[in-house]
């Protein structure tokens, strides 16, 4: 997988500033007060830093943005970034500042002078997240020079390193998700996906792979119907993290994360238009997020019991493919009339959700899926859609999403939408028409949630992969949800 940038935290060394190669960054608050290290850098550059701070450009710059001084006199460094940032900024401002430093850094060495920066750990997270590159399939890379590390000078480097360590685990989890979502479908087959998840056993996760024969015995015919037209075998992968051992939460049931893992979605017999179909490599985004969260929990040794379960299928049209009008029986026992084979994600999720509840009786459950185009019409690429049967769980998640800066917006559920799912020949249809398409999809899934299970459905179709860069990611897979879900678990389900 793509490895996050290495960031080393060290005590300040002002004597050697003139000889530092690569690039240097310093933080200056809005009022323009220079820190001791900024004053030192100003002296060796013959006043260049002070001139930048006194400029109109610095005055107009927003928090987390700065001025670049190219090839300053008096030092070996090729550039200095004078970053406008308060000593105690908001977390989002600090992360954005880190992201700006990642773009400034490029592939060369970077020295960050942040001895008194109170949000240095968040700066380091933003720096790591924005430095992501997916170039696994580029033979002729634009820049094939090795990426050099970053040194962050701070007055308390040991404390900063301890604070940044769990954030480095989050960055690795986000990178794992991004790699999975960015991979082409001829590489990330259901077999390859399952193998990548099984490899996380070396981190302490318990990983179990259920093959088609196992799924048939369990009665997961809704899920199996989706993949029956593909040469890639359908699978369910169970990842279990028992991190609460030895704590007062050791005997608590796990929190469950469920992911839709359609490694490629042609739409099946209800074939999608050719234009844009290449983007359907990202239709396993929900499973990718679940995998990234489980990796993060294992890396930071989270004191929580969490189970991540993903349904891995490929939706292809062939002579054995599921047809519109077919009726399938779910693991729960309900029958479903398949009106549109391109509404396949809910058929995968409903069986995996029921299995999770039957086997683990979780304390709560969240499913994630790139489920509907309608959610993009409603919320664009800024927010995921949140649907829930629990105000408490929903509010907890929305608070975690806000804290981590990942957009999420709650939408309604209501029995009034159930009439749109009525079928003449089965217990329900798999689609309810164009009206309220995201809501009827969530209402379908709600039928497979037990009354005693607090549950959220996250429709991430608009946020899993985007065509232009975001504040913390280049164009492509974002890794949305890894940070918010990790925060939720840390806040509400982890032993303190």
Image: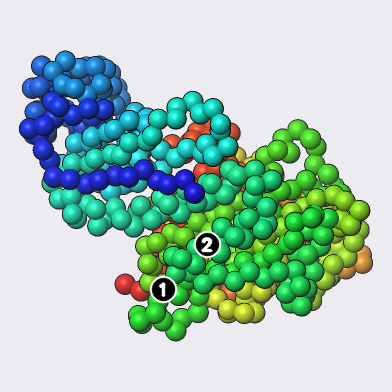
The image shows residue 70 at horizontal and vertical percentages of 26, 17
- SS at mark 2 in the image: helix
Disc number for residue 185: none
For disc 2, the marked residue is: 199
Front-most of residues 344 and 446: 344
**Which image quadrant is residue 43 in?**
top left
Rendered residue at 11%/32% (across/down): 16
Q: Which residue is mark 1?
A: 243
> In what quadrant of the picture does the C terminus appear?
bottom left
Q: Whole-Å distance between the Cαs marked 2 and 1?
A: 18 Å
- Left or right placement of residue 353 versus residue 134 in this view: right
Badge 2: residue crowd in 10 Å (few <14, some 14–19, many ≥20):
few
Question: Quadrant location of residue 31?
Answer: top left
Residue 375 appears at what percent x and percent y? Answer: 65, 46
N-term mark: 2 or 1: 2
Q: Is residue 437 above or below residue 113?
A: below
Task: Let me know if residue 486 appears in the view.
Answer: no
Question: SS for tag 1?
Answer: loop
Q: Residue visible at 50% across and 75% down? A: 254
Within 10 Å of the Cα at label 1, are there few (<14), some (14-19), or many (20+) other Cα atoms?
many
Left or right: where 360 falls relative to 13: right
Judge from the rendering whether residue 139 lies leftward or rightward of residue 11; answer left or right.
Answer: right
Across and down, in percent, residue 350 comes to 71, 66
**Which of the pair 10/466 is nearer the observer?**
10
Q: Looking at this view, name the residue that lies furthest to the bottom.
A: 251
For residue 360, above or below residue 324:
below
Q: In the image, what residue occupies the spot 74% across and 61% down? A: 233
Mark toward the viewer: 2 or 1? 2
Q: Compared to 209, does 21 lie above or below?
A: above
The image quadrant of residue 239 is bottom right
Please tell me which residue lies in front, 241 or 340: 241
């Amino acid at each position: 997988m793509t490895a996050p940038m290495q960031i080393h935290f060290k005590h300040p060394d002002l004597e050697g500033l003139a000889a530092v190669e690569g690039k240097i960054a310093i933080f200056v608050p809005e009022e323009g007060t220079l820190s001791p290290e900024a004053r030192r850098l100003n002296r060796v550059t013959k006043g260049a830093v002070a001139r930048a701070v006194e400029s109109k450009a610095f005055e107009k710059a927003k928090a987390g943005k700065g001025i670049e001084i190219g090839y300053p006199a008096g030092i070996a460094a090729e550039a200095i970034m004078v970053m406008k940032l308060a000593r105690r900024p908001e977390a989002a401002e600090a992360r954005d500042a880190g992201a700006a430093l990642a773009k400034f850094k490029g592939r060369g060495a970077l020295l960050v002078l942040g001895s008194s920066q109170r949000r240095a750990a968040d700066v380091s997270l933003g720096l790591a997240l924005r430095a992501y590159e997916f170039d696994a399939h580029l033979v002729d890379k634009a820049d094939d020079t090795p990426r050099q590390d970053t040194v962050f000078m701070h007055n308390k480097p040991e404390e900063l390193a301890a604070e940044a360590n769990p954030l480095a685990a989050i960055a690795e989890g986000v990178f794992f998700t991004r790699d999975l979502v960015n991979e082409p479908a001829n590489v990330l087959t259901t077999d390859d996906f399952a193998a990548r998840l099984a490899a996380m056993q070396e981190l302490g996760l318990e990983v179990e792979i259920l093959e088609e024969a196992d799924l048939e015995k369990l009665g997961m015919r809704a899920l199996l119907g989706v993949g029956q037209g593909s040469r890639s075998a359908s699978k369910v992968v169970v990842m279990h993290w028992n991190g609460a051992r030895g704590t007062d939460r050791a005997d608590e049931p796990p929190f469950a994360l469920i992911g839709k893992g359609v490694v490629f979605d042609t739409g099946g017999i209800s074939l999608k238009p050719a234009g844009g179909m290449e983007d359907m490599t990202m239709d396993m985004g929900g499973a990718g997020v679940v995998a990234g969260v489980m990796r993060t929990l294992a890396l930071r040794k989270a004191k929580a019991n969490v189970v991540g379960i993903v349904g891995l299928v490929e939706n292809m049209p062939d002579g054995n493919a599921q047809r519109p009008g077919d009726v399938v029986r779910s693991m729960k026992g309900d029958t479903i009339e398949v009106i549109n084979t391109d509404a396949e994600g809910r058929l995968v999720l409903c069986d995996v959700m029921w299995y999770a509840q039957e086997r683990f009786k979780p304390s709560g459950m969240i499913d994630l899926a790139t489920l509907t185009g309608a959610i993009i019409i409603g919320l664009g690429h800024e927010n995921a859609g949140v649907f829930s049967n629990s105000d408490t769980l929903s509010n907890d998640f929305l608070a975690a999403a806000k804290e981590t800066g990942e957009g999420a917006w709650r939408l309604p559920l209501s029995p009034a939408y159930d009439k749109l799912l009525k079928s003449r020949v089965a217990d329900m249809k798999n689609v309810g028409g164009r009206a309220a398409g995201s809501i009827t999809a969530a209402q379908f899934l709600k039928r497979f949630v037990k009354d005693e299970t607090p549950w959220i459905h996250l429709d991430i179709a608009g946020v899993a992969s985007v065509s232009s860069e975001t504040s913390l990611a280049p164009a492509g897979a974002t890794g949305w949800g890894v940070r918010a879900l990790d925060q939720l678990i840390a806040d509400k389900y982890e032993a303190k």
